[in-house]
Image: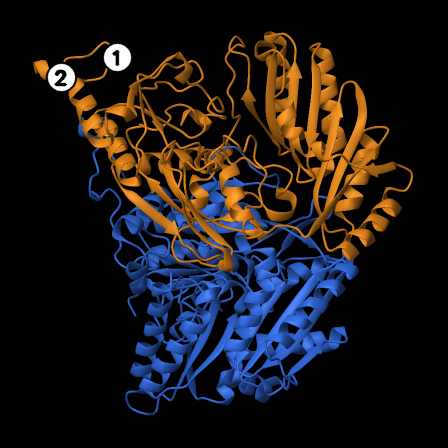
Chain colours: A blue, B orange
């Protein structure tokens, strides 16, 4: 490992104390990857600040010394967003895990970035509020990480994503200065930079305080499970539900392989079938009951063989446990697997599923499918065995081909996991050069030296001030009065 | 200087004018009249490109020639923001009105910036869908204009603001770049969320040429009620109780004024069974207050604020507060209005966003707005002035952008370094 100058290390230690600095090779291994374990880079050091001031002090040193840094929450990300940068440092926000304020009348909660997603709901549940974004990793992932990735979850079909629920941010910019974006009230004057920051994958700075919106729990929640001969019939039922003018809280789909894996892992008591649909409606009791009758009818008319309504909270929890454990459950049926995260317009589902099936057969690899079917977010899981020569490479090729299918269908390469390290090469397949250059110009406004998670998201980093296509320099620049950083 | 580029009476070099005519056609380049003035600034030319490509080229040529550009949709909110420091060209999206794709089964629509909201809604309604937004003057207001001003009404409570409805945008930048971000699918985290950046940016960063929205189904049935209260305190209690209840209301708005007790309107949408149950719950919640079926006209309340008789003695502001400060804010409004001898009217949403009309002498309007802004700033709120008399002494429309202003200026510098678009109209002199 390239040892950091002792002088800088001492300065960093002085900021965070001995306990807040990790620099021994053995301990650094913990931080060499996130939830995407096939990329690994050893950082020079890991800092664990416990206040905004400490984050600022660290970032100021990084700025002065031109040291790249990567902010890290719980490290559960699936696109390598928290992968350390060569010769850079990692700023772990794990110790900044205080819930600073709970304000029921205004439906706001103010948290530090290291707070765990589920703990936000935990602190407001008694008053019957909840924090809506619910990524499957919600019991371990952090709000700071959710902000970086604009995390979704099963219920974002109705309630929206992290960005819908973040109304304000305190951010340490890559030069160490502190800014407040948005606020507790809505529509603060100026550009919606909070909207730009959420989902920027740590490339625009470090969020140190987050103002969240919480939501009142609906009067009733009902969850229906329907078994179909295949995902085609299940998909047709989804289309009919949407066409009937309903906006369910969630619609999830699993194919046979995913059902078998989930059963093996958590015994969710799923019916055995080719396509399983989970439909959740919430709202006033009378409303939900009326609509659930319609959903039932729609499932039946699309050849559902078995329809069950969860009868208790415990049953409902079990249904969701199976779904949320689906990724990890793949370990039960395959030694290795790649989790993919593509999005397609919902109507393209039967066609894209057919194509995935064809590609899977061609490659001789199994693909299990778990979807947020309501919004067309596919999570194909490409199963392989690393011990068999050539399978890992074949799985990676298949995984990329699936994303290309999504792009061709008018969709996206990522619905909720982010681009990170993993998909940056795919960005130029989804966006044209001027699109990416424009995004990078925005980035240059936040991070002119490209220190904050510098190697992620974009396929080819652009130096700030580099001349884009038709760019004309500002007259005062030409005259040497001012310079672009 | 070359004789060919000597100035015309309009002040525009003839070479540039010739290029613009060659680009968009003679009939779509005309001299501006007094009716085209923007908050006191008189532009020279009005140009109506027919396509995205033409638009971006007009913008590039203007930028290159050092001319400033004021983008215009339906022109309904052109007076919002500060007066431009200079206005050379009006870039109108009047010809870019196509609804590119209504993917009704996917609940999305791609639409050109110049399409009016009303025409868009009529098209969407053919498949039982809507853009879940109730902006001002939909018959004239365009997609681009509504986005640039981030206009929202009562529906925001349930469906979010434009930032929550827009899923993709294409923007033309002054250097000739045409950039798309977001996409056609509702769920998408690839790349930066530039649709949010340009929403509410008052076209100071780029010109929105098209947008993609997520849609919602039209409601099966709806029913609305008016609930009267004796004072702001009772209204605040009612509003907070409704917000803290399990009612699934779509709209809730409260009217306050100097001459009548407060009234709140609430709208429910859904199945008949659901509506009946909610009405029962509402009546028990409102308890002592009187509940009556509301007339449908109640939902045009925001436009009615603009139906004032004398623009020279009226100011309109949008303000944002914490919902819990509603009663206190109404007292502040009444107090400032009385102190300055003004008449007042407020429309308030439970999101904390409110709309204020003040009427009286121009100098008094300024005093009241200043006092209110400083009080609201102290409570984490804000106040933005949307209409003010021409004769009112200079008053910044926006208020403070806080410690993020220099970052905002850097973003502006990156995308519009020559300050071509709407110069001086936005926050902090942007």
Label 2 crowding class (10 Å Cα cut-off): few <14, some 14-19, many 20+?
A: few
Give the secondary structure at mark 1.
loop
Q: Residue at x 75, y 46 (%)?
A: B243
**Does any portion of residue A448 appear in the rendered image?**
no
Q: CA distance from mark 2 to mark 1?
A: 13 Å
Q: Which residue is mark 1?
A: B10
Q: Is residue B366 above or below residue A311?
A: above
Q: Residue at x 79, y 28 (%)?
A: B262
Q: Is residue B237 above or below residue A36?
A: above
Quadrant of the snapshot with the N terminus of chain B: top left
Q: Is residue B47 above or below residue B191?
A: above
Q: How many marks?
A: 2
Give the secondary structure at mark 2.
helix
Q: Residue at x 57, y 9 (%)?
A: B312
Q: Is residue B30 above or below residue B238?
A: above
Instruction: Return the mark for residue A59.
Output: none
In which chain is the residue bearing label 1? B
The outermost residue toward the right is: B288
Expressed as whole percent of the image width and height from the top left, the position of residue B210 reads: 39, 43
Left or right: B182 with respect to A163?
left
Left or right: A481 with respect to A184?
left
Q: Nearer the viewer, residue A254 or A291?
A: A291
Q: Of the residues under marks 2 and 1, which one precedes in the sequence?
A: 2
Left or right: B58 with respect to B113?
left
Instruction: Return the mark for residue B5.
Output: 2
In which chain is the residue bearing label 2? B
Q: Quadrant of residue B195?
A: top left
């Amino acid at each position: 490992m390239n040892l950091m100058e002792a002088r800088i290390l001492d300065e960093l230690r002085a900021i965070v104390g001995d306990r807040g600095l990790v620099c021994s090779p053995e301990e650094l291994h913990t931080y060499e990857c996130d939830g995407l374990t096939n990329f690994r880079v050893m950082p020079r050091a890991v800092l664990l600040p416990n206040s905004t001031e400490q984050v600022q002090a660290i970032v100021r040193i990084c700025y002065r010394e031109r040291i790249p840094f990567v902010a890290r929450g719980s490290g559960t990300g699936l696109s390598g967003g928290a992968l350390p940068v060569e010769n850079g440092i990692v700023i772990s926000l794990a110790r900044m895990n205080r819930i600073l304020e709970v304000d029921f009348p205004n439906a706001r909660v103010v948290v530090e970035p290291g707070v765990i997603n589920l703990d936000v709901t935990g602190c407001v549940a008694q008053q019957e509020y909840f924090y809506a974004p619910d990524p499957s990793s919600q019991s371990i992932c952090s709000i700071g990480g959710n902000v970086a990735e604009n995390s979704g979850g099963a219920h974002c079909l109705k309630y929206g994503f992290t960005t819908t629920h973040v109304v304000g941010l305190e951010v340490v910019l890559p030069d160490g200065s502190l800014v407040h974006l948005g606020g507790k009230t809505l529509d603060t004057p100026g550009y919606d930079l909070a909207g730009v920051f959420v989902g920027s994958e740590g490339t625009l700075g470090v969020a140190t305080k987050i103002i969240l919106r919480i939501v009142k729990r609906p009067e009733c929640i009902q969850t229906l499970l329907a078994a179909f001969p295949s995902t085609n019939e299940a998909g047709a039922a989804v289309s009919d539900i949407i066409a009937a003018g309903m906006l369910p809280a969630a619609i999830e789909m699993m194919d046979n392989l995913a059902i078998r894996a989930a059963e093996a892992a958590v015994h969710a008591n799923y019916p055995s079938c080719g396509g399983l649909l989970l439909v959740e409606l919430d709202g006033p009791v009378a409303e939900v009951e009326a609509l659930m009758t319609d959903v039932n009818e729609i499932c039946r008319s699309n050849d559902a063989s078995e329809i069950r309504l969860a009868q208790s909270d415990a049953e409902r929890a079990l249904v969701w446990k199976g779904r949320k454990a689906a990724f990890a459950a793949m370990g039960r049926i395959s030694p290795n697997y790649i989790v993919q995260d593509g999005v397609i317009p919902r109507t393209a589902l039967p066609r894209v599923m057919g194509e995935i099936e064809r590609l899977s057969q061609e490659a001789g690899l199994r693909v299990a499918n778990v979807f947020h079917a309501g919004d067309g977010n596919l999570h194909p899981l490409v199963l392989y065995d690393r011990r068999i020569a050539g399978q890992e490479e074949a799985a990676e090729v298949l995984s990329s081909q699936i994303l290309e299918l999504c792009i061709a269908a008018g969709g996206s390469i990522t619905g909720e996991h982010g681009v990170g390290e993993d998909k940056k090469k795919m960005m130029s397949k989804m966006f044209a050069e001027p699109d990416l250059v424009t995004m990078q110009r925005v980035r240059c406004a936040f991070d002119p030296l490209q220190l904050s998670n510098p190697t992620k998201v974009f396929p080819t980093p652009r130096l700030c001030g580099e001349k884009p296509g038709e760019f004309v320099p500002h007259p005062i620049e030409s005259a040497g009065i001012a310079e672009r950083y | 200087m070359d004789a060919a580029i000597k100035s015309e009476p309009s002040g525009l070099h003839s070479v540039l004018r010739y290029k613009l005519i060659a680009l968009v056609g003679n009939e779509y380049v005309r001299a501006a009249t007094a009716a085209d003035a923007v908050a006191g600034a008189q532009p020279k030319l009005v140009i109506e490109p027919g396509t995205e490509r033409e638009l971006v080229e007009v913008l590039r040529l203007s930028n290159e020639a050092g001319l400033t550009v004021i983008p215009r949709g339906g022109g309904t909110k052109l007076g919002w923001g500060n007066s431009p420091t200079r206005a050379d060209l009006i870039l109108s999206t009047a010809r870019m009105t196509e609804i590119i794709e209504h993917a009704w089964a996917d609940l999305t629509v791609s639409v050109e910036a110049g399409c009016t909201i009303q025409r868009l809604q009529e098209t969407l309604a053919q498949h039982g869908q809507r853009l879940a937004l109730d902006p001002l003057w939909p018959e004239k207001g365009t997609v681009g204009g509504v986005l640039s001003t981030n206009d929202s009404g009562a529906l925001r409570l349930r469906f979010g603001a434009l930032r929550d409805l827009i899923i993709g945008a294409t923007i033309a930048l002054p250097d000739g770049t045409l950039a798309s971000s977001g996409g056609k699918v509702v769920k998408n985290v690839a790349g930066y969320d530039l649709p949010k950046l340009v929403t509410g940016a008052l076209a100071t960063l780029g010109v929105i040429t098209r947008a993609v929205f997520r849609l919602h189904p039209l409601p099966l049935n709806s029913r609305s009620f008016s609930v009267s209260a004796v004072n702001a305190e009772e209204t605040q209690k009612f509003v907070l109780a409704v917000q803290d209840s399990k009612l699934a209301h779509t709209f809730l708005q409260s009217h306050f004024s100097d001459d009548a007790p407060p009234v709140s309107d609430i709208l429910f949408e859904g199945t008949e069974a659901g509506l009946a149950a909610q009405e029962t719950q509402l009546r028990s919640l409102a308890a002592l207050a009187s509940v009556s079926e509301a007339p449908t006209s109640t939902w045009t309340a925001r436009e009615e604020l603009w139906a004032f008789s004398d623009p020279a003695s009226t100011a309109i502001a949008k303000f944002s507060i914490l919902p819990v400060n509603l009663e206190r804010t109404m007292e502040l409004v009444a107090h400032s209005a009385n102190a300055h001898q003004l008449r007042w009217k407020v429309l308030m949403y439970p999101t904390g966003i409110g709309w204020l009309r003040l009427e009286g002498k121009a100098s008094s309007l300024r005093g009241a707005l200043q006092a209110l802004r400083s009080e609201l700033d102290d409570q984490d709120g804000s106040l933005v002035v949307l209409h003010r008399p021409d004769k009112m002494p200079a008053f910044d429309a926006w208020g403070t952008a806080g410690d993020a202003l220099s970052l905002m200026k850097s973003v502006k510098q990156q995308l519009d370094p020559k300050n071509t678009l709407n110069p001086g109209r936005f926050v902090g002199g942007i």
